[in-house]
Image: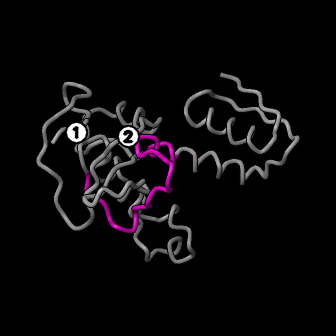
Amino acid sequence: MRAVRNTERGIEVVELPAPEGIGVRVRVRAAGICGTDLELVRLGPLPFTLGHEVGGLTDDSTPVVVLPLEYCGTCDRCLAGQTAQCRSAMAGMYGLGVDGAMADEMVVREDTLVSLPDGLDVRDASLVEPVAVALHAAHRAELREGQSVAVVGAGTIGLLCAAVAGGIGCDVSIAA
């Protein structure tokens, strides 16, 4: 199986054994490159496959998006329903604590899978996680139609924040 790793020689596509373990096999069809991935590359060689923005197909050809976190379910944040704030999040983040999506396939916990709605191409599903970040930002900012919004940065998250704000009816300016 092919996978993208940060090795002693830099970023490489390497051959690895097919993933094993308890969970559902996802054949990756799209994986995004996040700013987090770029920051990880700066750390030097890493013992895991990068990538946490992913869309793929299960063995029965169900198109899915993979939530990027294997939360513990037992810490105070999980018990409060805030699984994205799990105390052991770093160890259970695909592409950070466990092998990620920049590979031909991955094995993930079943509770991290979300079936895609009809009409959403699996190749676009790697944008679901960054769109969720933009929607969360708009919600936290309590954006309302007619407000003026400045977005600083024109990367994936910045452009998606601008799109969400524009969709709400805000007047958006982007500073790259």
Whether residue 127 is situated above or below residue 73 in the rendered picture = above
User: Quarter of the image holding residue 71?
Assistant: bottom left
User: Quarter of the image holding residue 45?
Assistant: top left
The residue under label 2 is: 31
For the point 68% across and 30% down, which residue is it?
Answer: 152
Disc 1 to disc 2, C-alpha distance = 11 Å
The residue under label 1 is: 3
* Residue 95 at x, y percent in the picture: 34, 47
Amino acid type indicated by mark 2: Ala
On the picture, is 86 further left or further right than 6? Answer: right
Amino acid type indicated by mark 1: Ala
For the record, the magenta segment spans 106-129
On the picture, is 156 further left or further right than 55? Answer: right
Whether residue 147 is situated above or below residue 111 in the rendered picture = above
Q: Mark on residue 57?
A: none
* Residue 88 at x, y percent in the picture: 41, 63
* Residue 141 at x, y percent in the picture: 76, 49
